[in-house]
Image (cartoon, rainbow, N blue to C red):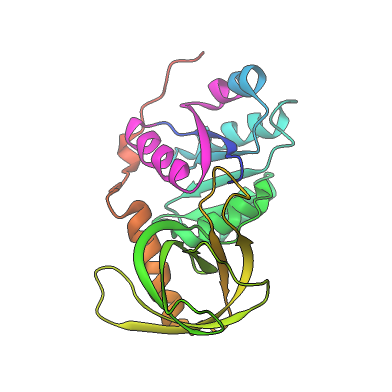
Amino acid sequence: MSERKRALLICHTTAGQMYLGVFLNRIWFSPTLAKTAEEGVLLAKSRGPFSLIILDGDLPEDILNSTMSLLRSDETAKDLPLVVITSDSDTEVKNALIAQGCSAVLTKPLDIAFVYGVLGRLSRQLRKYPRVPIRMQVEIEGGNPEKALPCTNISEEGLYLRTHAPLPHKTVLGLHFTLPHSTEKIRVSAEVARALPLGIHVKTEPGMGLRFLDLSDLVRQQIRNFVHWQLIGDLNWEPDSKEFKPAESV
């Protein structure tokens, strides 16, 4: 499994830090928390390097502007991709942030697949979609002698099947499965993208990674909803701009 990318998270509230910290950790980032831009800059100097900076932008306008100015002028932080998360969906606000040097603007409530895609692109993650562990049986049609195999993780891109006899690269299979807590059977085709025979990788269970070939919009949304719920369905954060309290300077 790839190494977690390190993210500097600047958020002025404890509730926001907890939510975003857990959110980032679950999509395979390692967050370091700061409450102000000044604190973030000090952390960038002492605990870097980071792959990117994530800023909760629900701040009074003057503080947001000074925060952006500091992060884009400091020698340690200015070259890092800067992502701002905000409740304001106004296009002019987004354009203003981009003009100040922001790499991307994400709007609350956060769509986990979209956030993962943006952060992954900026930090050069290899995966396009977040995946989650799962326990389900997958029925197989095609060139596999085993008619059903256990699935251990899934994403919008594909799934991983546990087996001691993985099939050759590019083998195409028909798959039938039902997501946990659902009654609707999903039927898709997929090809073998990665094969791990028994004993090749000590830390990885033997099996094969399959890439979906023909996901309909409906099936993609079903898988996306499942992944979203598994990752952050237990989290609840409705930040209020009144929650802001200036932090002491560091």
Does residue 206 sit above or below 50 in this rendering?
A: below
Q: Residue at x 36, y 33 (%)?
A: 244
Does residue 39 sit above or below 21 in this rendering?
A: above
Is residue 89 visible to the viewer in this orientation of the structure?
no
Of 211 and 116, which appears nearest the observer? 211
Image quadrant where residue 240 sits: top left
Residue 110 point in image, percent of width and height: 42, 56
Is residue 52 visible to the viewer in this orientation of the structure?
yes
Q: Residue at x 66, y 19 (%)?
A: 45
Q: Is residue 72 left or right of residue 22?
A: right
Q: Residue at x 56, y 53 (%)?
A: 105
Q: Residue furthest top?
A: 250
Instruction: Tell me which secondary structure the magenta stretch mostly adopts.
Output: helix
Magenta residues (range): 13-41
Residue 88 point in image, percent of width and height: 45, 54
Of 29 and 180, which appears nearest the observer? 180
